[in-house]
Amino acid sequence: MDKQVNNEIMKQKIMVCCGTGCTANGGRDVYKAFLEQLSSISNIEVLPMVKQTGCNGWCEKGPLVKIMPEDITYCGVKVADVGEIIDKTLLQKQVIKRLLYRDPATKKHITSHHQTNFYRKQHKIALRNIGEIDPGNIQDYIDRGGYQALQKAFSSLTPQQLIDEIISSGLRGRGGGGFPTGRKWQACKDAQGSPKYIICNGDEGDPGAFMDRSIMEGDPHTVIEGMILCAYAVGASHGFVYVRDEYDLAVAYLKKAIQDARIHGYLGKGILGSNLNFDIEIVRGGGAFVCGEETALMASIEGRPGEPYDKYVFPTEKGLWGQPTIINNVESWANIPVIILKGAQEFKKIGTAGSSGTKVFSLVGKVVNTGLVEVPMGTSLREIIYEIGGGVLRNRSFKAVQTGGPSGGCIPASLLDLKVDFDTLTQAGSMMGSGGMIVMDDHTCMVEVARYYLNFLAGESCGKCTPCREGIRALLEILTRICDGEGQMKDLDLLEEISSTMQEASLCALGRTAANPVLSTIRYFRDEYLAHIKEQRCPAGVCRKLTTFYIEPEKCNGCGLCTRNCPANAIVGEKKQFHVIDNESCIRCGECYRQCRFDAVQVM
Amino acid sequence: MYIDPREYEYHSEYERMIKAYPPEQRYLLAIMQDIQKEFHYLPRLALKIISQHIGVPFSKVYAIASFYKAFSLVPKGRVVFRVCDGTACHIKNSETLIDQLHKQLGIGPGETSADGEYSLETVNCLGACALAPVMVVNGKVYGKVGPSSIEKIIKEYGGCCHGQAGK
Amino acid sequence: MFITINNRQIEVQTGETILQVCRRENIFIPTFCYHEAFGGQGACRMCMVEVKENGRNKNRLVAACTYPVTATIEVFTESDRVQQVRRTLVMLLKRRAAQDPYIEELAHKYEAPLLPKLKVDPQGCILCRLCILACEKMGKSAIWTVLRGIDKRIATPYDEETDECMGCKACAEICPTQAITFLEDGEKRSIWNKTFTLVSCERCGKPYATREQLEYMREQTGYETAQICEPCRKKTLASQVEKYQN
């Protein structure tokens, strides 16, 4: 092969998604295969060509491979496809149709992922670099405008002007509560005391949410740049990134990013020739959901059990080791460089009056396109779930969407047109939380969902204060009773009384919001509670003690899917003849009910 | 306090790992994490040394070790099955996976088989919701696992089934 | 600075907690986890009171034991909201310590409904943590909380006997619900999975303290004292004072 061709090849970039979802599907093997197979072509440097990127968000279709600058996205790429991609796409500039995404509605193949419904409606700020850069390479970040906000701040903004910019951007904390970020910074700047600390809360613990992980793994420098800007604004000398225990990859990339930032003079003494001294340390969490709460997180950094304390004096005055401290969540930090670089006014144009900017949601559950989506605040649930998410799996009927994790609530179909922002979600009895969005269909039992969350919280509460510890215990007992068909009508009143005290009297936000899953499901799905209590029936076929399945002979064509999937061997029938469930050996796991393509399996 | 004599074989190793950190309370978790990573649990002797090195009462060191889920106070099995029970996995029937593993391995969530072969754990969310329900066995991720495939996965790790595993 | 509590003007020092003010003024606020020796923990939440603060449009409930007064506020210690919360809290705590007379009294006062009893360890423990604080202050921190969430409890590490416990019973004496049990039989005392030998008073001959306790006192004070129990010590002291007055 001659040199010219090789130069031509080298202009191309192959970006292999190595986010969690893609890695689990073999993304890293695909990356290695590209490296190996390309190195057999002489006269090319392989490493700059093949990049492993963070999560593209479209986990459903992974592993994803993007070819730039042609902007071709291949879905579900396997190691076996790598040779063909090199031969046809890289060398001969041909698009391989079978690896493209095929729009289920129009049946058309789509070359660039940007044209898909999943991406078209998104507006990426916090996720702007993820999937576009190698998170281990600081130059990639710099090439896309990284650390320019810092240069701008140092050369043209005073600390107060920087804070004013954040205040006027209207940015609210993305970790859950939605407290105005600029006001927090102002309070810390005004507070007496030195040193001051800055903390990045990366203890993402909501089940079903993984946006922070994706940012830390896919674009660690944006978090670091955000923190340096804050250090400059409030006069802090030391920063901590508190990362959830399970996130090994995030720790690895953050470590590398911090080292590289030091080498480039963005961290350390006299940053970029200024008199700012600031450095960042990584602290690994111990595995406790409650440490997402500010005071528990600080206790954890100090080396104590993650038990919160009353915040009548804010951390901005007395935080870590009693010093003024700022805590912001990963996604908030990722927004900071963009606000400073492009200006608050640009940022404010996006979103709603009360909630500016975008929000990243992890769209999961019974939805066609699962993954991470970033949309302007004020986008309706319907747009997110149906247009971006492609609707409910298998065209089943939508029942609810759960937002805000264990602190949030379940929002019913009647509110699908709700325009999502901090305030609308709270009004609907749920919460923004960190941005989990779990779609539920008619096979999901809402009483059991409430029980699930309370069971989660029973193990995750720190156990310090009475209302949270004993309240959760009592709620869990009652919900379990109802799921087992032993509930009574007066249990509903008891659930509400205990919930109300938990909201009023709990020490921290975990306890104050712990009853939300209960209250929101009672509010919107009372009929399901009543079915469990009065009729001893679980309409969704989930609660095992209340469920019996049967197969409707007319609908069953004997395909055998249920038999193959039954873990208890409880389904019998000849091929192409209708099948029967043996109730004696059936364990009510509902696998047949979920699997059957013809709706032949029914709940009695 | 009783300490398993076998732990003394690692005495110098514990000391080396623990004393790599300055004697300050803020390094408690980091030290424990190192020990947990190396030994897959927190040995009593190691906790004792930590308590002396940091100057924090043993009861408080134990309180912290038992508070955080990242730490185990008993040795984990050779094969660790971690089933994700995050919301996305839960509504896609992860409970049945847990039940099946329980039945096949003869151990419940949080338990380790008597012969030290298997541990069963549930985790709150692995952030791989697109692959729900998800299970991780010794670091390898299995996505979209059906209850009927549990038997096959256990066999991959040298187990036999129906409560007979490792016995 | 002045604040109002239940519509009454009261002078306070900046930084005092609402509970400190109320105790001084003899205003009733029930507590379980508070002890003046240790300050507020904010754990039991029985001391929740309603406050009206400047700049907040809604009143909120705060824990009187941890809320420092830093501005002029209005406090209500028995509002409907407060009573409702206390009613539920007592209902929940009574499950853990059904026999406790003070809880019974509060259950009566706030008309708390009865829920089924719970089995907890130690039985009757309401996790106020005063025992931990007492042990930390008086002894060598033999006990702490273990686990978390609804499984949280007070224990020695591994539920075994410890080198730290010296059998002084400070934990049992401070416990508001008498949940920490100990056995005393002649010269033996058993507590927290450990049995101690008691030393007898040189004056009256009654066994009064553990050997470990006296040892610890020697370590702390640095001098040897006569082995005399508290009542005898007082008697001696009284007689000396008498002599001096005569």
Image: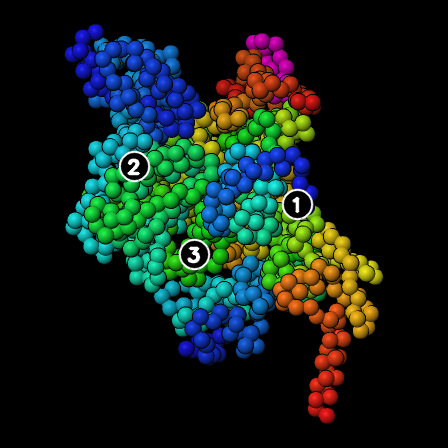
Q: Give the residue drawn at x 38%, y 28%.
A: A19
Span of residues in magenta: A565-581
The dominant secondary structure in magenta is: loop
Instruction: Describe residue B3's horizontal placement relative to residue A598 as left or right.
Output: right
Q: Give the residue drawn at x 56%, y 13%.
A: A560
Q: Is residue A425 visible?
A: no
Q: Say which chain tag 2 marks.
A: A
Q: Quadrant of residue A374?
A: top left
Q: Residues within 10 Å of mark 1 (few under 14, many from 20)?
A: some
Residue C213 in percent (x, y) is at 70, 62
For disc 2, the marked residue is A260
Q: Residues within 10 Å of mark 2 (few under 14, many from 20)?
A: some
Task: Indicate the amino acid at tag 3.
Answer: Trp
User: Which of the two discs, 1 and 2, sits closer to the camera?
Assistant: 2
Residue C107 in percent (x, y) is at 65, 63
For disc 1, the marked residue is C158
| Kind of element beneath mark 3 | helix
For disc 3, the marked residue is A321
Q: Which mark is residue A342?
A: none
Query: Which residue lies most toward the bottom here?
Result: C246
Query: Which residue lies most toward the front here?
Result: C223
| Kind of element beneath mark 2 | helix
Query: Which residue lies most toward the top here?
Result: A1
Task: Indicate the amino acid at tag 2.
Answer: Asp
- A274 vs A1, nearest the viewer: A274
Q: Is residue A199 visible?
A: yes
Q: Quadrant of residue A142?
A: top left
Q: CA distance from mark 2 to mark 3?
A: 29 Å
Residues beneath discs 1 and 3 located on the same chain: no
Q: Give the residue drawn at x 52%, y 50%.
A: B54
- Give yes or no for residue A248 being in the magenta stretch: no
